[in-house]
Amino acid sequence: MKSILLHIHDDVGADSRLQAACDLARACNAHVHCVQVTPLPDLVAADVYGGAGYAPSIAAELHEIDEAYRTKMEARLGQEDIAWDWRQIDGDSVAGLLSAARLSDAIVATLPEGGRVHLSDPLPIVADLALGGRTPVLAVPQACKGFAVTGTALIAWDGSPESCAALRAAVPLLQRAQAVEIVSVEEADKAEFPSTAAPEYLARHGIKAQLHSWPRKGRAVDVALQEAIGTLAADWVVMGAFGHSRWRELVFGGVTRAMLRDTRVPLLLAH
């Protein structure tokens, strides 16, 4: 990975995002592309109800706030030993980030804790970023202190197109991990050794991985995965995003939605 897009936004997850992006950039000798999106579309919608006269002044105020934050962040970035640049965009956050990420190898965004109650809470955009583009998303829990690229990586493996996409995207990082654990959760309450396709693929890239058939024991798949993360002391997780439609996951529940809600280590997601 040589080009990392960092979502710039003034929220309580900003420090963990920045640290994760810097850790990733240092590990891969990569360039960090800082993208700050000023969300002006809401102002345009308000104009329909008679707010047109105020829109320019509100937009100017938002740009002034973002410019002050840019000055603060550039001072922080100047203290890091990484290459970086800055881009400011007006528009919807997800659309702006996806557009800017077309030639990026990963997007670094925050995995919020709970719902968005205050303006300082991170934007809940990880799922939209993972589904909306072709660029893998490194979802960093807002309480994380960084991204231990060289630590223990866990791959949530089920052989789906989504998990295959995540595995391929993760290869440059898995090559730097000290340990790689592949976890396949049993689909029934009986031991069935999972397919060896994933470790065989990684072996061709010079990556040694341990394959685990993790007992489900009648639990939800995400509960079994969370147990595996704790037991194997994983520092970060690779997984496919939304193997079922997002609507189906919303109605019936799903592994991705549960992992986004409950995981406290960085997730590298691809769809």
Image: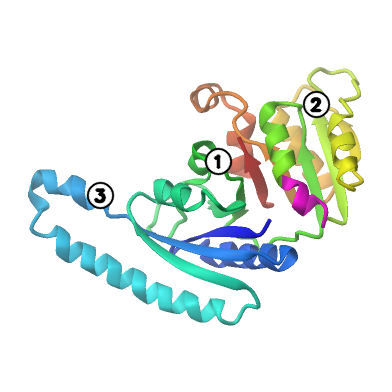
For mark 1, what is the residue? 130
Magenta: main secondary structure equals helix
The location of residue 217, given as percent across then percent down, is 81, 24
The location of residue 196, given as percent across then percent down, is 89, 29
Left or right: where does residue 130 sit relative to residue 45?
right
Q: Which residue lies at the image location 59% right of the left edge and 23% below the top edge?
A: 244
The location of residue 112, given as percent across then percent down, is 53, 51
Marking on residue 142: none
Foreground tag (3 vs 1): 1
Of the image marks 2 and 3, the number of the one nearer the N terminus: 3
Are discs 3 and 1 less than 8 Å apart at CB?
Answer: no
Relative vertical location of residue 89 with respect to residue 115 in this rendering, above or below: below
Relative vertical location of residue 268 with respect to residue 211 in this rendering, above or below: below
Could you tell me which quadrant the N terminus lies in? bottom right
Give the total number of marks visible in the rendering. 3
Of the image marks 3 and 1, the number of the one nearer the N terminus: 3
Are discs 1 and 2 less than 8 Å apart at CB?
Answer: no
Marking on residue 216: 2
Please check the rendered image and state whether residue 171 is part of the magenta-colored stretch, yes or no. yes
Marks 1 and 2, Cα distance to the nearest angstrom? 26 Å
Q: Amino acid at mark 2?
A: Arg
Q: Which residue lies at the image location 54% right of the left edge and 78% below the top edge?
A: 76
Q: Which residue lies at the image location 74% right of the left edge and 40% below the top edge?
A: 167
Q: Amino acid at mark 1?
A: Ala
User: Which element is circle 3 on?
Assistant: helix
Foreground tag (1 vs 2): 1
Relative vertical location of residue 44 with respect to residue 58 in this rendering, above or below: above
